[in-house]
Image: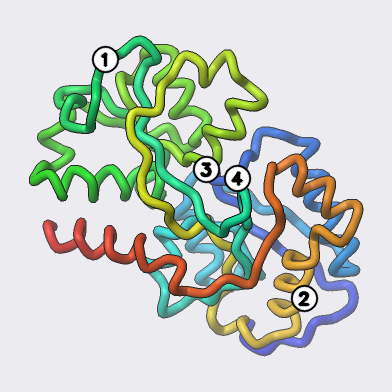
């Protein structure tokens, strides 16, 4: 696909991972309509259960672009190019939250020893890597630290697992938890944020490096970074609770890279 001509009727394939608030069909339709209008061609939103599946499609050129996570962006930094980064509450940054039951008295991560812990995805920064790195900094290994852990493959489902008592603690995207607190306050109200990570690069939109200099990539980047100027785009952004998208820079993800290197160094 590198350098492919972009015919007028070509469909754009745009990937989404569970970092996206994907259960809202109205939101998906709004995003697709905006991108189709801005790009002046059909757009297919491609979704899969895991981050790994979307990353594989992106790396193989089967997607023109995808809204992924900072963790796979760092893992495959030599093979991916940044197209845009969401801006939330004035910054292209977000946090990972460690959550517990609302009534629990735990004060820090070490109080979670022996828990049943819910992660979102093994390739999620906020829903996995940040907690792995936090434990490593305490000299702990998650396999021995938690009595049991499991993946929900959705940040919303991490919140549901902790709120219902299926898990005693969980690792979740702070942006998702905050948006859920607006639209599902009864659910997030049954959880408490025990720990917030430092600010890290918000999950980016990326393409395979071979497509980075093509008209396809340029058009997608432009459509995203000017989204707030269009009524359809503004409506989608409002539903996402985002300010907009910015070009961003790979250095935004240096903090995630440090966590990735730390966890890798410990095997």
| Contact flag, marks 4 and 3 (Cβ < 8 Å) | no
Q: Which residue is mark 4?
A: 20
Q: Nearer the viewer, residue 101 or 8?
A: 101
Q: Residues within 10 Å of mark 4 (few under 14, many from 20)?
A: some
The span from disc 4 to disc 3 (Cα, nearest Å) is 12 Å
Q: Quadrant of the N terminus?
A: bottom right
Q: Residues within 10 Å of mark 2 (few under 14, many from 20)?
A: some
The span from disc 2 to disc 3 (Cα, nearest Å) is 27 Å
Q: Which residue is mark 3?
A: 49
Q: Which residue is mark 2?
A: 219
Residue ID at (51%, 16%): 189
Q: Nearer the viewer, residue 226 or 108?
A: 108
Q: Residues within 10 Å of mark 1 (few under 14, many from 20)?
A: few
As helix, strand or loop, the secondary structure at mark 2 comes to helix
Q: In the rendered view, does 130 fall on the left or right side of 189?
A: left
Residue ID at (42%, 32%): 152
Scheme of colours in the image: rainbow
The correct choice, above or below, for 192 with respect to 200 in the image is above
Horizontal and vertical percent position of residue 100: 35, 22
Q: Which residue is mark 1?
A: 105
Horizontal and vertical percent position of residue 74: 39, 67
| Contact flag, marks 2 and 3 (Cβ < 8 Å) | no
The span from disc 1 to disc 4 (Cα, nearest Å) is 31 Å
Q: Quadrant of residue 41?
A: bottom right
């Amino acid at each position: 696909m590198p350098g492919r001509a972009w015919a007028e009727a070509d469909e754009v394939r745009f990937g989404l991972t569970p970092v996206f608030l994907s259960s809202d069909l109205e939101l998906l339709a709004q995003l697709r309509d905006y991108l189709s209008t801005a790009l002046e061609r059909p757009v297919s939103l491609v979704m899969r259960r895991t981050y790994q599946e979307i990353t594989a499609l992106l790396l193989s050129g089967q997607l023109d672009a995808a809204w992924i996570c900072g963790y796979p962006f760092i893992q495959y930094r030599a093979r991916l190019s940044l197209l845009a980064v969401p801006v939330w509450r004035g910054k292209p940054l977000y946090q990972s939250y460690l959550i517990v039951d609302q009534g629990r008295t735990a004060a820090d991560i070490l109080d979670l020893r022996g828990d049943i812990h819910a992660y979102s995805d093994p390739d999620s920064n906020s829903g996995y890597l940040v907690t792995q790195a936090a434990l490593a900094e305490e000299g702990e290994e998650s396999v021995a630290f938690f009595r049991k852990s499991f993946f929900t493959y959705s940040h919303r489902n991490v919140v549901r697992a902790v709120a219902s008592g299926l898990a005693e603690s969980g690792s979740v995207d702070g942006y998702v938890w905050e948006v859920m607190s607006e639209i599902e306050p009864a659910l997030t109200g049954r959880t408490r944020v025990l720990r917030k990570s430092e600010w890290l690069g918000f999950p980016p939109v990326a393409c395979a490096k071979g497509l980075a200099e093509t008209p396809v990539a340029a058009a997608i980047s432009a459509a995203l970074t000017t989204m707030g100027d269009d009524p359809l785009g503004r409506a989608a952004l409002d539903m996402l609770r985002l300010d907009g998208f910015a070009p961003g820079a790979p250095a935004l993800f240096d903090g995630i890279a440090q966590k990735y290197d730390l966890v890798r160094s410990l095997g």
